[in-house]
Image (tube, rainbow, N blue to C red):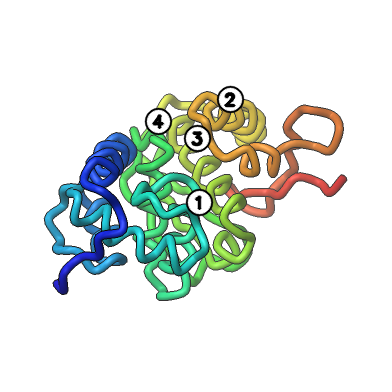
C-alpha cells in the first residue's frame, strides 16, 4: 500500500489503535476495515491502520481521530452497502455491538428475501439457526439494520434454548433486544428507533414471516 497519511501524532495513533482493538475482536472485521482504508490486510489493528482511517473520516466530515466509533462505523457500513459488500457490513455490526452468535450457523445477505427484512430458520427447535438478511434491512437505514440484526440474533438464542411459540419469541425478543442494546451503549438513535413515541416502551408489531423485523408504529 501507499504510505499512510500522518494526520495523527504518534500518541493519538496509539490511542486510536488501542480503542479499535477494544471494539473489534474478530480478525475478519479488522481485515474489512483495513481493506476499506487501503491498509495491509494483517487482521491486526496498527497505528498505520489508524492513520488511514482518518482519510475516510475526513472525507465524510467526521471527527478525525482514527477511531472506529459509532459514526465511523456508520460510514463504513454505508460504503460497504454501496459497494455490494453487505456480508462485511453485517460482520462489522455484530462485532462492534458484541451481539451473541451462540447457536448461529450462518448469517448472510440474501437478495431473494423480499417479504421481510430478514428470515430466521432452523431444522428443529432447539437447534442451530441460519439468518438471511434481505435488501429491505439495508434500505431502512443504519439504525434499522442494527435493529434487524439484533432481532434475528435474539430469535437464534430463543431457538437454541427451545422456545417453540412464535408469538412468545417475538415478545421476549423485543424486550431482551432493547435491554441488550441499552446495556451495551448502542447508539441512542438505534434504541429510540425501537421505542413508541412518548410511551417509553418497545412497540412490538406482528411480522409477515417468522423472524421478520417490524418497525415501530410512527408517533
Element under disc 2: helix
Comes first in the chain, label 1 or label 3: 1
81 up-or-down from 21: above or below: below
Q: Please identify the quarter of the rendering in which residue 64 is found.
A: bottom left
User: Disc 4 to disc 3, how far (Cα)?
Assistant: 10 Å
Q: Which is nearer the N-term, disc 4 or disc 3?
A: 3
Would you call the spot at circle 1 few (<14 residues within 10 Å), some (14-19), or many (20 or more)? some
* Residue 108 to residue 202: above or below: below
Report the residue marked by disc 4: 160
Write down the residue under mark 3: 154
Where residue 199 sits, quadrant-wise, is top right
Q: Residue tagged by mark 2?
A: 179
Camera-side residue of 158 and 17: 17
Q: Nearer the viewer, mark 1 or mark 3?
A: 1
Real-space Cα separation, disc 2 to disc 1, in angstroms: 22 Å
Q: Residue at 29% of width from left, 52% of height from top?
A: 8
- Give the foreground label among 3 and 2: 2
Q: Is residue 131 left or right of residue 185?
A: left
Question: In front: mark 4 or mark 2?
Answer: 2
Specify which label sits upstream in the sequence, 4 or 2. Answer: 4
Neighbor class of circle 3 (other Cα within 10 Å; few <14, some 14-19, many 20+) is many
Amino acid at each position: 500500500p501507499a504510505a499512510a497519511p500522518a494526520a495523527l501524532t504518534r500518541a493519538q495513533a496509539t490511542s486510536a489503535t488501542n480503542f479499535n482493538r477494544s471494539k473489534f475482536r474478530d480478525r475478519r472485521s479488522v481485515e474489512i476495515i483495513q481493506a476499506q482504508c487501503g491498509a495491509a490486510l494483517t487482521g491486526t489493528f496498527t497505528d498505520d491502520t489508524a492513520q488511514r482511517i482518518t482519510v475516510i473520516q475526513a472525507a465524510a466530515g467526521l471527527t478525525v481521530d482514527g477511531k472506529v466509533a459509532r459514526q465511523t462505523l456508520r460510514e463504513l457500513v454505508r460504503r460497504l452497502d454501496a459497494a455490494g459488500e453487505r456480508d462485511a457490513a453485517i460482520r462489522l455490526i455484530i462485532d462492534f455491538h458484541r451481539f451473541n452468535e451462540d447457536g448461529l450457523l450462518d448469517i448472510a445477505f440474501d437478495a431473494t428475501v423480499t417479504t421481510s427484512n430478514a428470515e430466521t430458520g432452523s431444522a428443529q427447535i432447539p437447534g442451530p439457526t441460519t439468518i438471511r438478511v434481505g435488501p429491505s434491512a439495508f434500505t431502512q437505514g443504519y439504525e434499522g439494520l442494527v435493529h434487524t440484526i439484533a432481532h434475528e440474533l435474539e430469535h437464534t438464542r430463543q431457538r437454541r434454548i427451545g422456545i417453540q411459540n412464535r408469538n412468545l419469541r417475538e415478545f421476549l425478543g423485543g424486550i431482551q433486544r432493547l435491554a441488550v442494546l441499552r446495556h451495551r451503549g448502542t447508539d441512542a438513535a438505534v434504541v429510540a428507533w425501537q421505542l413508541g413515541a412518548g410511551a417509553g416502551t418497545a412497540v412490538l408489531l406482528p411480522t409477515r414471516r417468522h423472524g421478520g423485523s417490524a418497525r415501530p408504529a410512527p408517533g
